[in-house]
Each structure stands twice: as structure tokens, then as C-alpha cells.
Amino acid sequence: MSGLYILGYFIVSFFALSIIGLFIFWIDRKITARLQWRVGPPWYQNFADIIKLSGKEVLIPENSNKFMFIFSPILALISATICGTILLLILRSELGFEGDLILFVYLLTLPSLSIILGGSASGNVLASVGISRELKLLLSYELPFICGIIIPTIKTHFTTSLIEILKYQQLNGSHIFSISGIIGFIIILISSTGKIGVVPFDLAEAETEIAGGALIEYSGILLGFYKLAKSILLFVIPAFIILLYLGGTTLDNLLGVLIFILKYIFVVVLITLIRNTNPRLRIDQALKFFWGWLTLIGIVGILFALSGV
């Protein structure tokens, strides 16, 4: 696979992932509105918001680290897009290597780290509160999230290849049809709400408390990059969960695409229900929850996976 082909695939994936992510984010907002007895936004609202932000002036704080302030949202968008591109290539069985799971998990942490870097570069006091929350949240949900990743790797003979995990489930059935698989699916699903940054774990940008948090100084297209990266993650993370626990699928035929869409809708609906049935937690409550019960359940799931259950 040539470098030119990969670059072209990345560019096409960026536009495809952006469109899908913004549309799915609209579905999430629409379901949320209906549950709250509201009409909700029109289908084009998220697209209009990005276009509007791209036309607004970018204001850079006078005492900020200008390079880091500008680079951070670009890093978030690039890393989210690379994650989506990797998943699309794997689901089409075009790319895969031993250790790509480790690379994927590393790239998946960059959007959160970019929020921390960008907020730090702004020099705003309210941003520092959001940075503190984002950092603590990252350190807390990452532990059970990793537990949720270890379980399918154990069940797939300790492989760290995403494509091998996919092929194993296609031959032996989805991991979710086991006790350890159910446990792993639940903990990675809950941890993912923190990674996406939605209720009850949207502590770092709680508008009603800290006026946007770490992103308070961002405007224009730079803020649009962060919003777009979050929308892409709303596709990437559910697709990653599908690959790990729901047997994945192949996107090289119409039936495979339809199966993937159904599985994807299932995971997104679960995330939407979680965010609409739980209040925002305090940071200490989130830490206790992730490092306490959820991590303990994850360790139990790992022990079950080691025993072959």
C-alpha cells in the first residue's frame, strides 16, 4: 500500500467520518430532545454550526502560548481521524499488524491530551479548572477502559492485533456471548462515555459551572476543530466497541455494511440512554466510580477471561 494511497484514503476518510459523526451527533441530540419533551435541532444543525464557526474570527489570548494554542485542536482532529481511518481499513480487511491495538489506544488518548494542552496554552483561570478535571478524568476512566480492552485480547489468545480479534470472532462468535465478554462490554461502554465527554462525565466543559472549561478561550475554526473531533469520536469509539465485542463485520459488501449500521445504532442508543438517565457527577464521584467499582468489575472480567469463561 503506497503512501499516496494512504494519504488519499485519509483525506476521504476525514470527510466521510466528519459527515457521519455530525449526523450521528444530531441523532443523539434529537433523541435527547425527545426524551426531554423538546423538538430538537434540524438535521443540518451540526453542519451549520461547523460552517458558522469556520467563518468566525479566531481570537488568541494575548498571554497564551500561540503555537500550542493553535496546534492542540489540530492535533485532536488529526488523531481522531487517524483512529477512524485505521478502523475503516481494518473493517475492510485492508490493513492490520501485530500491535495495532496498542497504537490505536495511544492515538485515542490524544484528543483528551490536546484539550489539556490547549487549555494550558490559553492561560485562562477557568480553563485551568477544566484542565484539572480533564486530567483527573483521563487518569480515572483510562484504567477500566484498558481492562475492557484486555478481556478480548485474552480471549483471542493474547493478540494485540485488531484484525486478528475481528477474524477470531467471525470464526468463533462474538465475545459478548460469554460472561467475561458481557462484563467487558459494560465497563468499556461506560468508560467510553467519559472518553467522548458526554453526561455524566462532561466535567471538563460543564458550561453551567465553568463556562466551557478548558475550551473557554477557543473560538472560530479552532473551536470547530474540537467539536468536529468530538463528533468523529462518536463514530470511532462505538465502532471500536463493535470490533472488540460484537463480532465486528466486513464493509466490503452491502450485507456487512447493514449489519455494522445495526450494531452501531445499538451502541449509540446505549450511550445516549446513559447520558440521559444520569446526572453529571462531581470529579471525586467520577474518580471513585472509575477507580473503585468499575475497575474492580474489570479485574473480575479479566479473571473470568483467563479462566476461559
Image (cartoon, grey):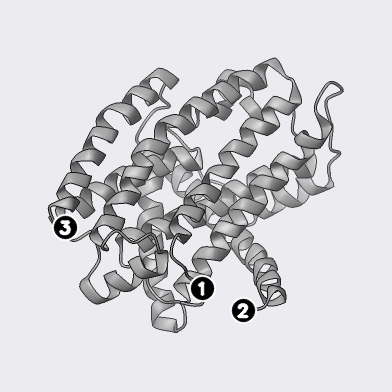
Q: Position of residue 308 (x, y in %)?
A: 13, 57
> Callout 1, which amino acid?
Leu
First along the sequence among labels 2 and 1:
2
The residue lying at 55 percent from left, 50 percent from top is 107
Q: Where is residue 33 in the image (x, y as percent from the top left)?
A: 48, 43
From the image, tell me which residue sits under label 1.
95
Query: Horizontally, is 76 left or right of 248 in the view?
Result: right
> Callout 2, which amino acid?
Met
Instruction: Return the residue nearer the eye: 17 or 154.
Output: 154
How far is the residue under mark 2 from the one under mark 3? Answer: 37 Å
How far is the residue under mark 1 from the one under mark 3? Answer: 28 Å
How far is the residue under mark 2 from the one under mark 1? Answer: 9 Å
The residue lying at 67 percent from left, 32 percent from top is 117
The residue lying at 42 percent from left, 38 percent from top is 142
Q: Work out which quarter of the rendered image holds the C terminus and state it.
A: bottom left
Residue 34 in sight here: yes
Disc 2, disc 3: CB below 8 Å? no
Element type where label 2 sits in the image: loop
Mark 1 burial class by Cα count in 10 Å: few <14, some 14-19, many 20+: some
Is 51 placed above or below 88 here?
A: above
Residue 219 in sight here: no
> Callout 3, which amino acid?
Ser
From the image, tell me which residue sits under label 3.
178
Q: Work out which quarter of the rendered image holds the N terminus and state it.
A: bottom right
**Count of all numbered marks drawn on residues in the image:** 3
Is 66 placed above or below 303 here?
A: above
Mark 2 burial class by Cα count in 10 Å: few <14, some 14-19, many 20+: few
The residue lying at 70 percent from left, 67 percent from top is 11
Instruction: Return the residue nearer the eye: 281 or 244.
Output: 244
From the image, tell me which residue sits under label 2.
1
First along the sequence among labels 2 and 3:
2
